[in-house]
Amino acid sequence: MSVIDQLSTELARLPGIGPKTALRLVHHLLKGSREQPRRLARALEEVADRVRACRVCGNFTEHEECEVCVNPRRDASIVCVVEEAFEVGAIERTGQYRGLFHVLGGHLAPLDGVGPNELNVASLLGRIRDARGGVNEVILATNASVEGEATAVYLEEMIRPMGARVSRLARGIPVGSDLEYVDGTTIAEALAGRREM
């Protein structure tokens, strides 16, 4: 296998990149200066060497604890649970959330052999238990997929007896949508989650 094929194969393993896109990326790197692929290689090595999971929440960081966990201005009484670390950034970009996070590292998928023991569930329950009533609310921000819903239901059953309020992100009609193009399930969730104006 040529080095071009090796790199293309490795790039194709990334989510959202198929074999054709991977080959296009390799060719793009080769058309530029020789320094461009070297910079990319150095950046990948730095990430592999320096980035790890936060020991508290599981978010990616270059330190023992991430910037969110060490920030004393964050509201430690609220923990938002997400499936993957990149979702922390999506919520942070809104500028509307001031609590802490917990990254599960995926969702329950029994057919794929992913149960609670393969996820960052035990440390979440430990955080809530160790807070001795300090965690008042856990927001379950898992995806709106079958697996995400199953994960949320499982977590709710585990967390509620610990005394913390369990909430779920609201679902509904995206801003800028026309009702005629929105599917029935989304409209039903929007109706169920409606609020007074």
Image: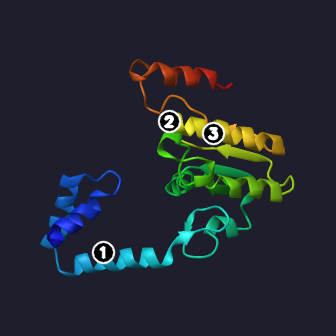
The image quarter in which residue 170 lies:
top right
> Which disc, if any, is residue 145?
2
Residue 168 vs 184, above or below: the answer is: below
Residue 104: % across, % down: 59, 53
Helix, strand or loop at label 2? It is: loop
Residue found 17% across the figure and 65% down from its top: 5
> Which disc, if any, is residue 152?
3
The residue singled out by tag 1 in the image is 40
Q: Do tag 2 and tag 1 residues touch (Cβ < 8 Å)?
A: no
Q: On the rendered image, what quadrant is the C terminus found in? A: top right
Helix, strand or loop at label 1? It is: helix
> Which disc, if any, is residue 21?
none
The amino acid sitting under disc 1 is: Leu
Residue 32: % across, % down: 16, 73
- Does residue 99 show up? no
Residue found 56% across the figure and 51% down from its top: 91
